[in-house]
Each structure stands twice: as structure tokens, then as C-alpha cells.
Image (tube, rainbow, N blue to C red):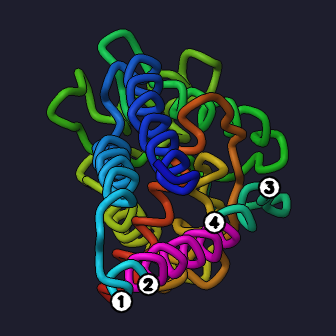
């Protein structure tokens, strides 16, 4: 087998192993995690096919497709990375806390990081209304919005300061529903979400008509970060094709 074939197979095996790793880490609850075994299967097949006698044009077409795909992913990841250290000026009118998965025993690691980020900036936004945003998924014991509110109250935040938006099912609905609650598209708004999620959230907010919107990036590390960054590239592509960005 050629060196290129071995590289393909090793890369494919790495995709399968990564799928198992992030599955164990996240209780196999990550959205679109199926991309890793699917990509692994494609790469292993490509590695095995390097031994086959294929037409030159087909080999070139595959290499062009692979190269174009890698270039697109790199470009999209540059956008994702550009929002990973976002902060907001003091004195925001509203802090929108975007929901993330809720486990049976409490918030997921991603949601916990968002809660930590809110608590870290509260003193900078003493008059801000907090909007907890996120509906209830089929495997979640309560809505993401309720979990956010309850956890913030446990940490000492006045419950009267927190509004609940518990009907949304994705980031676009999070933003649009919160905008409707705010009423004023020119209000100073900060969106609190994980670092990998900031760029897309801000683009959706601006598309929805919020004109004075900022991001507050909650740090996120760990083995699932790479998955979330790749997932963002997929989501950005889908939203762009649908004219949502």
C-alpha cells in the first residue's frame, strides 16, 4: 500500500477513535457527531482504493474535492476563531444567555461555562436584564432557559432580573425570540455563549436586526472543542446557503 493510502487509513481510524472519545465524554449526546464515523469511513475507503486501478481523472477529481473541502473548512474556522475572545463594553441593557444541553443531573459542561461567564461580567452590567434562552429538548429534564435561571438564582442573581425565553429550538430562534422580547432593535445587547459559537450567534443577531450587539465568549476547552468548531463550520455553511447570515 502507498504512503498516501496509509495516511488515509490512519486518518480514518483517528476519526473513529475521536467519535468514541467525545461520545464517552458527552454521554453520546452531541449533535451531528455522526460526521466523525462517516468521515472515517470515507477516508478508510479512499485509503483502500489507492491500491485499485482507477482512472486518472477520477483520482484528480477526488484530490480537487478534498483540497477544496479543506480550504473551505480552514476559511470557516478562521471566522470561528475570530470570535473566540469576544468581550462587550460595560453597561449593556440586556445579556442574552444562549442555552446548551441540560443533563438529568444539571447543566452540561458547555452550559456551565456560559453560566460562569455571566457571573464573571455581572458587575460590568449592573442594570442589564438577563434573558435565559432555550427550549426543552427531548432528552432534557427541563428547558434550557429554566436551567439557566435556576442555576443563576442559586449563585445569587435576583430572579426578578431574569426573563425566560423557553420556546426556541436552535440559535436562530433564540435570537429572534429574544429580539421580540426586547422590542428595541437598537438596545445594547450582549450574547453570552461559548467561544466557538460567538461568530455565528452575532451574525444571526445582526441578520435579525439587532444593531448594537456584542459577544461575550465563555471559555471552552476539552476534547469536544474540536468537534464543536467543526460543527460550527457546518452550521455556518448551512445558514449561508439558506440566506440566514
Q: Is residue 118 above or below residue 84?
A: above
Query: Which tag is nearer the camera, tag 3 or tag 1?
Result: 1
Instruction: Characterize the magenta stretch by its predominant secondary structure.
Output: helix
Circle 2/circle 3 CB separation < 8 Å: no
The residue beneath circle 3 is 85
Is 189 magenta? The answer is no
Label 3 SS:
loop
Q: Which residues are magenta?
A: 60-79
Residue placed furthest toward the top: 105
- Badge 4 or badge 1: first in the primary sequence: 1
Which of these two is toward me, 204 or 94? 204
User: In the figure, is residue 15 to the left or right of 169?
Assistant: right
**Foreground of the two, 16 or 115:** 16
Q: Depth-wise, is mark 4 or mark 3 nearer the camera?
A: 4
Identity of the residue drawn at 43% across and 43% down:
12
Crowding at mark 2 (Cα within 10 Å: few <14, some 14-19, many 20+)? few
Residue 60's disc is: 2
Label 1, on which residue? 57
Element class at badge 4: helix
- Please report whichever mark, 2 or 3, sits nearer to the chain's N-terminal start: 2
Residue contact at pointers 1 and 2, CB within 8 angstroms: yes
Q: Which residue is mark 4?
A: 77
Residue 122 position, x and y percent, is: 75, 40
User: Horizontal and vertical percent for residue 185?
Assistant: 52, 82
Amino acid at each position: 500500500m502507498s504512503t498516501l493510502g496509509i495516511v488515509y487509513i490512519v486518518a480514518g481510524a483517528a476519526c473513529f477513535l475521536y467519535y468514541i472519545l467525545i461520545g464517552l465524554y458527552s454521554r453520546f449526546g452531541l449533535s451531528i457527531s455522526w460526521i466523525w464515523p462517516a468521515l472515517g469511513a470515507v477516508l478508510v475507503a479512499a485509503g483502500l482504493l489507492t491500491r485499485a486501478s482507477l482512472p486518472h481523472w477520477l483520482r484528480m477529481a477526488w484530490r480537487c474535492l478534498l483540497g477544496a473541502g479543506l480550504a473551505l473548512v480552514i476559511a470557516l474556522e478562521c471566522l470561528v476563531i475570530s470570535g473566540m475572545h469576544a468581550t462587550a463594553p460595560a453597561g449593556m441593557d440586556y445579556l442574552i444567555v444562549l442555552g446548551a444541553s441540560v443533563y438529568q443531573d444539571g447543566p452540561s459542561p458547555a452550559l456551565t461555562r456560559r453560566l460562569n461567564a455571566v457571573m464573571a461580567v455581572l458587575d460590568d452590567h449592573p442594570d442589564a436584564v438577563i434573558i435565559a434562552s432555550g427550549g426543552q429538548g427531548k432528552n432534557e429534564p427541563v428547558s434550557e432557559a429554566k436551567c439557566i435561571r435556576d442555576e443563576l438564582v442559586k449563585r445569587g442573581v435576583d430572579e426578578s432580573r431574569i426573563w425566560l425565553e423557553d420556546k426556541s429550538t436552535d440559535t436562530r430562534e433564540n435570537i429572534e425570540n429574544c429580539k421580540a422580547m426586547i422590542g428595541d432593535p437598537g438596545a445594547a445587547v450582549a450574547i453570552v455563549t461559548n467561544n466557538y459559537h460567538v461568530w455565528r450567534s452575532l451574525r444571526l443577531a445582526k441578520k435579525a436586526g439587532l444593531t448594537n450587539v456584542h459577544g461575550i465568549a465563555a471559555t471552552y476547552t476539552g476534547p469536544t472543542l474540536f468537534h464543536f468548531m467543526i460543527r460550527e463550520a457546518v452550521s455556518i455553511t448551512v445558514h449561508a446557503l439558506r440566506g440566514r447570515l
